Image (tube, rainbow, N blue to C red):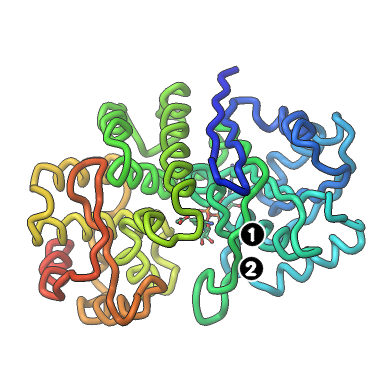
């Protein structure tokens, strides 16, 4: 068993990310060591619970936790306040107390919703993340962004609420559909570009990046460690996104516009981020922030991960430019872009000329 522990060093709410190949079975012991109360509500969806629910419950019960479970239906369309109401009802019936814990077993959707419910039930009870998608392992489970969608926009309702523990068992990726794995790989590549040149080099040296089984377990472990460390470093320095944390949105500005203009049906989030990173790189090229060789290296990694790198034919540049104005991160009418300046380094700019955006987009057709 290889186990690695990464600390998210927040002044008030520090916690650990444990990465271990038998993490699911050690969950109970980990939680017990944190002194969490007896009652635990395990929250998941039918897909993930079907694979891993009983192992998680066994691990918790074996050390004396009293466990109930609640399942959200699977899918982004259920990431709503109405779904949370069902969990609140169950929390009431099971008599969850302030000392109790909600444990999220699933991808980013289950994690975001469970975190929001934990933040709001009794004004805040314990919360533990067991991410089961690559995207949730390296991104969504770390950093305390929780919430649900509003009919008018994604993640408009939410709270910052840090978990007490993130427990990652890489073996659960064996059942994750390949397309979901690739979408998570986009966020991994993102960390290589924005923060960790060594991670980027390791990804370049990897034989394949498009399927979890194609990665040797020690390489997968290393990729998880470096990605989680990158996210932990950034969040530890800027918990509530006052500044630095915005760099995590690399590839997300154009990415969000593409997702939204295709009605969230054509691309998974990570796939849109892949396109967004290519676009951001081309903007950086147009503005002389970085060079063609860096652009080529990033493109090669995104292609190696089997992610799309071109804009779909159905959306025109005018609608993308117009959509950018509705981005959550627009400040005083100015669109903020995260732009690469070297492998492992980015800057944030709200002075990107529209010409640079349009000429960059033209290279993605
Ligand atoms: P997801 O939660 O929808 O999971 C993807 C699919 O994989 C689902 O059908 C799920 O049931 C299935 N699945 C999950 N783990 C599995 C496993 N091990 N084996 C088999 N199937 C499995 O998608 P996601 O990409 O993990 O998360 C997307 C959500 O995360 C979005 O709602 C997004 O807004 C949110 N998000 C949040 C943050 C944050 O910082 N909080 C960051 C990024 C994304
Ligand atoms: N996923 C971006 C963030 O956590 O800030």
What residue appears at the point 55 percent right and 46 percent down from the top-left corner?
10
Q: Nearer the viewer, residue 203 or 3?
A: 3
What kind of element bears circle 2?
helix
Q: Which quarter of the figure has residue 276? A: bottom left
* Above-or-below relation of 246 to 129: below
Q: Nearer the viewer, residue 180 or 239?
A: 239
* Above-or-below relation of 53 to 44: above
- Horizontal arrangement in the rendering, residue 306 relative to residue 122 (left or right): left
The residue where tag 1 is placed is: 74
Residue 164, how many percent across, how many down?
Answer: 67, 44
Residue 37, how many percent across, how many down?
Answer: 85, 43
Quadrant in the picture for the N terminus: top right
Mark 1 burial class by Cα count in 10 Å: few <14, some 14-19, many 20+: some
Q: How many marks?
A: 2
Circles 2 and 1 in contact, beta carbons < 8 Å? yes
Q: Which mark is residue 31?
A: none
What residue appears at the point 71 percent right and 50 percent down from the top-left corner?
127
The residue where tag 2 is placed is: 78
- Horizontal arrangement in the rendering, residue 89 relative to residue 365 (left or right): right
Disc 1, ligand 1: is the CB inside 8 Å? yes
Quadrant in the picture for the C terminus: bottom left
Residue 222, how many percent across, how many down?
Answer: 43, 27
What residue appears at the point 68 percent right and 32 percent down from the top-left corner?
24
Q: Nearer the viewer, residue 90 or 329?
A: 329
Q: Which quarter of the figure has residue 182? A: top left
- Horizontal arrangement in the rendering, residue 160 relative to residue 62 (left or right): left
What residue appears at the point 57 percent right and 54 percent down from the top-left corner?
144
């Amino acid at each position: 068993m290889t186990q690695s522990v990464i600390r998210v060093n927040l002044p008030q709410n520090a916690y650990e990310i444990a990465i271990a190949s038998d993490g699911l079975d050690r969950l109970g012991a980990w939680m017990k060591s944190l002194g969490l109360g007896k009652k635990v509500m395990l929250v998941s969806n039918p897909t993930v619970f079907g694979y891993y629910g009983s192992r998680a419950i066994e691990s918790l019960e074996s050390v004396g936790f009293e466990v109930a479970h609640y399942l959200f239906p699977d899918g982004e369309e259920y990431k709503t306040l109405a779904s949370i109401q069902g969990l609140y009802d169950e929390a009431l019936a099971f008599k969850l107390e302030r000392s109790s814990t909600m444990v999220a077993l699933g991808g980013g959707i289950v994690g975001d919703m469970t975190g929001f419910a934990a933040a709001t039930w009794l004004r805040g009870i314990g919360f533990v993340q067991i991410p089961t998608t690559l995207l949730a392992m390296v991104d969504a489970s770390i950093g305390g962004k929780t919430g649900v969608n509003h009919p008018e926009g994604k993640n408009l309702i939410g709270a910052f609420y840090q978990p007490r523990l993130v427990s990652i068992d890489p073996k659960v990726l064996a059942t994750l559909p390949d397309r979901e794995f690739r979408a998570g790989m986009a966020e991994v590549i993102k960390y290589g570009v924005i923060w960790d040149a060594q991670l980027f080099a390791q990804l370049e040296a990897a034989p394949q990046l498009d399927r979890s089984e194609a990665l040797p377990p020690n390489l997968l472990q290393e990729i998880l460690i470096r990605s989680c460390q990158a996210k932990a470093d950034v969040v530890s320095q800027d918990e509530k996104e006052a500044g630095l944390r915005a760099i995590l949105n690399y590839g997300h500005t154009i990415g969000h516009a593409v997702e939204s203009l295709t009605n969230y049906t054509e691309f998974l989030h990570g796939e849109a981020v892949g396109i967004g990173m290519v676009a951001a790189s081309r903007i950086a090229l147009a503005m002389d922030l970085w060079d063609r060789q860096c652009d080529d290296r990033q493109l090669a990694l995104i292609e190696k991960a089997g992610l799309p790198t071109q804009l779909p034919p159905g959306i025109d540049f005018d609608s993308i430019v117009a959509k950018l104005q509705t981005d959550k991160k627009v400040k005083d009418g100015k669109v903020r872009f995260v732009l690469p300046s070297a492998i492992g380094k980015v800057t944030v700019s709200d002075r990107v000329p529209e010409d640079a955006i349009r000429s960059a987009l033209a290279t993605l057709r």
